Amino acid sequence: MKIAIVGAGLGGLTAALSFIKRGFDVTVFEQASELKELGAGVQLGPNAVGVLYYLGLEKILSQYTTPTEGKNVRLWNTGQRWPLFDLGTLAIELYGFPYLTMHRADLQKILQQEVLRLKPGAIVLNAKVKSATQNGPRVGIEFDSGSRHECDLLVGADGVHSAIRASLFGKHEAKQSGIMAWRGVIDTQKLPSHMLEKVATNWVGPGAHVVQYPLKNGALMNFVGAIEGQRWDKESWSERGSTDECLNDFVGWHPDIQTLIKAIDTPYKWVLKLRDPMSSWTRGSITLLGDACHPMLPFLAQGAGMALEDGYILARCVEKYASAIPQALQRYEALRLERTERVVNGSNANAKRFHNPALANAQGAQAYVSSEWHEEKVKERYDWLFRYNVEAVDV
Ligand SMILES: Cc1cc2nc3c(=O)[nH]c(=O)nc-3n(C[C@H](O)[C@H](O)[C@H](O)COP(=O)(O)OP(=O)(O)OC[C@H]3O[C@@H](n4cnc5c(N)ncnc54)[C@H](O)[C@@H]3O)c2cc1C
């Protein structure tokens, strides 16, 4: 059986490795001329870390991840702090795996190197796919260059602007969320000592929030600032903004936020769009994974996590039902639909929570945080998410 995956992002590479480890013949087609994630971090919940550990990457990951002591909620103007959850020992005790933060480029490189170690030549670069069609039991892939390729199973892991999804289902219509995100990576040598603690923080305020967490064992700090208001319209990892524009969006915020923004090397901006969950993303021997089928707001920090889980569960289903590919893909989709839809909806709900008007002043914030981030409520929002174990799922 020949398997083709379109897209060598975190989801496509995880799927490729999951298939290769099960003995399948896989080729990944990637439009870029080299694999390099732009500077940004990624948070990986215990559910996502489990996927990577099952793929045998625990040892190599430990060289690149930052043991983060905990996660806090802080108030936008006073800096008042409330604990959110433990990211170390307790996460392992409860879920079997830690909660990790790392540079996206490091994760992509680890996955790429492992895929190529096990199957040299498995990743074809400069290969932009235009469309895909089912021809009897086989799948034809057409490239922008005019060349063609045939396979028995095709996975569209080509992200939010997926050509494979468009080929199968038409364009995935997007609605504005009214929220923009600033992203940046900071050299921590530029930060004062009181800002170097290895904790992840969600700063919450009316109409905006900021997420910061350490990368590369504290050498870098990741910054994401989400703010309501429509000021640009590009969903792109490479759209640059300026420090002044970013500072302007966080006027009145705590001095630590001002310090962080001034220290960002290049601030990038990204418009956050909403897409309704798909009711199906499989046709015959073609399926989708990750942002290609369930893009989401990044407010549960689980988009990449879902793509990783998809890849692993997909390979398990294909292994189990290898003689009947469409059946294997239907089983994969059925196993993933409800969970990913719940994450999409949970991410939307966090936008309202993180940006709530009750956070405007310290008194309202105390009452709101005590209720919304109460231990029981946090458990209700995250426990089902972190507890998912890709090996325990009955495929
Ligand atoms: C600001 C922000 C912060 C985030 N933080 C987190 C976080 O902390 N934790 C988390 O889990 N998630 C996070 N996410 C979400 C996460 O980044 C995505 O969900 C994840 O990258 C999706 O992975 P993917 O492999 O599905 O798609 P992508 O990463 O988009 O990869 C798609 C790949 O396909 C390639 N491609 C596209 N079209 C074609 C084509 N036609 N032919 C060939 N190749 C093609 C692309 O070049 C790319 O390499 C965040 C997102 C944003 C915007």
Image (cartoon, rainbow, N blue to C red):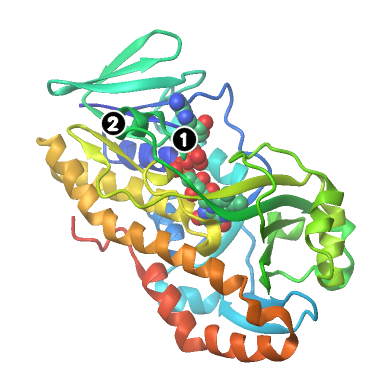
Residue 322 visible in this rendered orientation of the protein: no
Q: Residue furthest left?
A: 323
User: Which secondary structure lies at badge 2?
Assistant: helix
- Where in the figure is residue 319, as x and y percent of width and height? 19, 42
Residue 389 visible in this rendered orientation of the protein: yes
- Residue drawn at x 81%, y 70% is 253
Q: Is residue 254 above or below residue 263?
A: below
- Where in the figure is residue 22, as x and y percent of width and height? 27, 40
- Residue drawn at x 87%, y 55% is 262
**Residue to which mark 1 is pinned:** 161
**Disc ID at residue 342:** none
Determine whether, in the image, residue 236 is placed left or right of residue 350: right
Q: Quadrant of the N terminus?
A: top left
Q: Is residue 65 above or below residue 110?
A: below
Using the image as rendered, state which of residue 101 and residue 361 is in the foreground: 361
Assess disc 2: are there few (<14), some (14-19) or many (≥20) residues with their C-alpha within 10 Å of its C-alpha. some
Query: Disc 2 versus disc 1: distance between alpha carbons?
Result: 13 Å
Is the C-beta of the residue carrying label 1 under 8 Å from the nearest atom of ligand 1?
yes
Determine whether, in the image, residue 147 is placed left or right of residue 181: left
Assess disc 1: are there few (<14), some (14-19) or many (≥20) residues with their C-alpha within 10 Å of its C-alpha. some
The residue under label 2 is which amino acid type?
Leu
**Residue to which mark 2 is pinned:** 168
Whether the residues at callouts 2 and 1 have beta carbons within 8 Å, the answer is no
- Where in the figure is residue 236, as x and y percent of width and height? 61, 38
Q: Is residue 205 above or below residue 217?
A: below
Q: Quadrant of the C terminus?
A: bottom left
- Residue drawn at x 48%, y 63% is 348
- Where in the figure is residue 249, as x and y percent of width and height? 78, 58
Q: Is residue 280 above or below residue 224?
A: above
